[in-house]
Amino acid sequence: MAFFENFTTSIKQKWLDYFQTNRGWLSLQMENHSVRTPDGGRRPSSYLILGVVNAIEPKLGNLMVPFYRLNANEDALVEVLGLNFDPDMELSKEGGTTVNVRSSNAEADLSRLLPDLQEEEQYDPLA
Protein backbone atom coordinates (compact mmCIF):
# COMPACT_ATOMS: atom_id res chain seq x y z
CA MET A 1 0.00 0.00 0.00
CA ALA A 2 2.92 2.37 0.68
CA PHE A 3 4.04 1.91 -2.94
CA PHE A 4 0.66 3.04 -4.25
CA GLU A 5 0.53 6.05 -1.91
CA ASN A 6 4.01 7.15 -3.01
CA PHE A 7 3.08 6.52 -6.63
CA THR A 8 -0.13 8.58 -6.45
CA THR A 9 1.73 11.39 -4.66
CA SER A 10 4.24 11.42 -7.51
CA ILE A 11 1.46 11.42 -10.12
CA LYS A 12 -0.30 14.26 -8.32
CA GLN A 13 2.87 16.39 -8.35
CA LYS A 14 3.53 15.64 -12.02
CA TRP A 15 -0.08 16.56 -12.85
CA LEU A 16 0.26 19.85 -10.92
CA ASP A 17 3.55 20.63 -12.70
CA TYR A 18 1.90 19.90 -16.06
CA PHE A 19 -1.17 21.96 -15.17
CA GLN A 20 0.94 24.90 -14.06
CA THR A 21 3.05 24.81 -17.22
CA ASN A 22 -0.04 24.51 -19.45
CA ARG A 23 -2.43 26.64 -17.37
CA GLY A 24 -3.22 28.98 -20.27
CA TRP A 25 -4.77 26.48 -22.66
CA LEU A 26 -6.16 24.26 -19.89
CA SER A 27 -8.06 27.22 -18.42
CA LEU A 28 -9.54 27.92 -21.84
CA GLN A 29 -10.49 24.27 -22.25
CA MET A 30 -12.13 24.27 -18.82
CA GLU A 31 -14.31 27.24 -19.77
CA ASN A 32 -16.11 24.87 -22.15
CA HIS A 33 -15.92 21.67 -20.13
CA SER A 34 -14.98 21.14 -16.53
CA VAL A 35 -15.93 18.81 -13.71
CA ARG A 36 -16.95 19.92 -10.21
CA THR A 37 -14.60 18.70 -7.48
CA PRO A 38 -15.25 17.77 -3.83
CA ASP A 39 -13.19 20.79 -2.72
CA GLY A 40 -15.74 23.12 -4.34
CA GLY A 41 -13.64 23.85 -7.41
CA ARG A 42 -13.36 22.46 -10.89
CA ARG A 43 -10.93 20.42 -12.92
CA PRO A 44 -10.47 19.27 -16.52
CA SER A 45 -12.33 16.21 -17.78
CA SER A 46 -11.30 12.80 -16.54
CA TYR A 47 -10.31 11.71 -20.04
CA LEU A 48 -7.90 14.63 -20.36
CA ILE A 49 -6.38 14.00 -16.91
CA LEU A 50 -5.95 10.28 -17.56
CA GLY A 51 -4.36 10.95 -20.94
CA VAL A 52 -1.92 13.46 -19.50
CA VAL A 53 -0.88 11.41 -16.47
CA ASN A 54 -0.39 8.31 -18.61
CA ALA A 55 1.84 10.31 -20.94
CA ILE A 56 3.93 11.90 -18.19
CA GLU A 57 4.14 8.73 -16.08
CA PRO A 58 4.68 5.71 -18.33
CA LYS A 59 4.61 3.29 -15.38
CA LEU A 60 0.94 4.13 -14.88
CA GLY A 61 0.16 2.28 -18.11
CA ASN A 62 0.95 -0.99 -16.32
CA LEU A 63 -1.85 -0.30 -13.84
CA MET A 64 -4.49 1.03 -16.21
CA VAL A 65 -5.51 -2.32 -17.71
CA PRO A 66 -6.34 -3.91 -14.34
CA PHE A 67 -7.92 -0.65 -13.13
CA TYR A 68 -10.17 -0.50 -16.22
CA ARG A 69 -11.10 -4.15 -15.83
CA LEU A 70 -12.17 -3.50 -12.24
CA ASN A 71 -14.01 -0.27 -13.00
CA ALA A 72 -14.10 1.36 -16.42
CA ASN A 73 -15.56 4.60 -15.03
CA GLU A 74 -13.03 7.34 -15.82
CA ASP A 75 -14.23 9.55 -12.96
CA ALA A 76 -13.69 6.70 -10.49
CA LEU A 77 -10.17 6.17 -11.87
CA VAL A 78 -9.34 9.85 -11.37
CA GLU A 79 -10.64 9.51 -7.79
CA VAL A 80 -8.54 6.38 -7.13
CA LEU A 81 -5.43 8.13 -8.44
CA GLY A 82 -6.07 11.05 -6.06
CA LEU A 83 -6.60 13.58 -8.86
CA ASN A 84 -10.19 14.66 -8.16
CA PHE A 85 -9.30 18.16 -6.98
CA ASP A 86 -9.13 21.69 -8.32
CA PRO A 87 -5.54 22.14 -9.58
CA ASP A 88 -5.73 25.94 -9.27
CA MET A 89 -6.75 25.66 -5.62
CA GLU A 90 -4.02 23.10 -4.94
CA LEU A 91 -1.33 25.23 -6.56
CA SER A 92 -2.42 28.28 -4.56
CA LYS A 93 -2.08 26.20 -1.35
CA GLU A 94 1.51 25.46 -2.36
CA GLY A 95 2.20 29.10 -3.06
CA GLY A 96 1.53 28.76 -6.78
CA THR A 97 5.15 28.17 -7.64
CA THR A 98 6.02 24.54 -7.98
CA VAL A 99 9.30 24.00 -9.72
CA ASN A 100 10.20 20.72 -11.28
CA VAL A 101 13.69 20.31 -12.69
CA ARG A 102 12.41 17.80 -15.23
CA SER A 103 9.73 20.15 -16.56
CA SER A 104 12.24 23.03 -16.66
CA ASN A 105 14.55 20.86 -18.77
CA ALA A 106 11.63 19.90 -20.99
CA GLU A 107 10.81 23.59 -21.51
CA ALA A 108 14.43 24.29 -22.42
CA ASP A 109 14.41 21.38 -24.90
CA LEU A 110 11.12 22.58 -26.36
CA SER A 111 12.33 26.14 -26.71
CA ARG A 112 15.15 24.87 -28.94
CA LEU A 113 12.60 23.14 -31.18
CA LEU A 114 10.24 26.07 -31.56
CA PRO A 115 11.36 29.05 -33.62
CA ASP A 116 11.25 32.56 -32.17
CA LEU A 117 8.46 34.68 -33.59
CA GLN A 118 10.92 36.77 -35.62
CA GLU A 119 12.50 33.66 -37.10
CA GLU A 120 9.06 32.27 -37.90
CA GLU A 121 8.09 35.46 -39.74
CA GLN A 122 11.25 35.21 -41.86
CA TYR A 123 10.75 31.53 -42.65
CA ASP A 124 9.98 30.94 -46.29
CA PRO A 125 8.90 27.33 -46.97
CA LEU A 126 9.48 27.80 -50.70
CA ALA A 127 13.07 28.95 -50.30
Image (spheres, grey):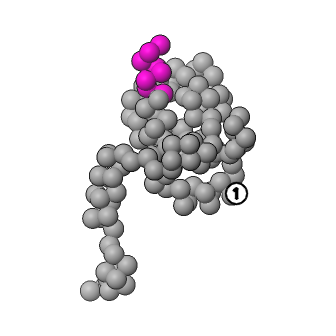
Residue 74 visible in rendering: no
x and y, in percent, of residue 50 in the image: 54, 38
Asked if residue 84 is positioned above or below residue 32 in the image, the reply reads above
Question: Residue drawn 65% across and 28% down?
Answer: 76
Using the image as rendered, state which of residue 91 and residue 122 is in the foreground.
Answer: 91
Asked if residue 68 is positioned above or below residue 104 in the image, the reply reads above
Using the image as rendered, state which of residue 72 and residue 53 is in the foreground.
Answer: 53
Question: Residue drawn 52% across and 20% down?
Answer: 66
x and y, in percent, of residue 114 in the image: 33, 68
Neighbour tally class for label 1: few under 14, some 14-19, many 20 plus, Cα within 10 Å: few
Magenta stretch: helix, strand or loop mostly: helix
- In terms of image quadrants, where is residue 55? top left
Q: Which residues are magenta?
A: 1-8
Which amino acid type is marked by label 1? Asn
Question: Residue drawn 48% across and 21% down?
Answer: 5
Q: Is residue 90 left or right of residue 126?
A: right
**SS at badge 1:** helix
- In terms of image quadrants, where is residue 80? top right
x and y, in percent, of residue 104 in the image: 33, 52
The quadrant the C terminus occupies is: bottom left
Question: Residue drawn 69% across and 37% down?
Answer: 39
Q: Is residue 126 left or right of residue 97?
A: left
Q: Which residue lies under the disc numbered 1?
A: 32
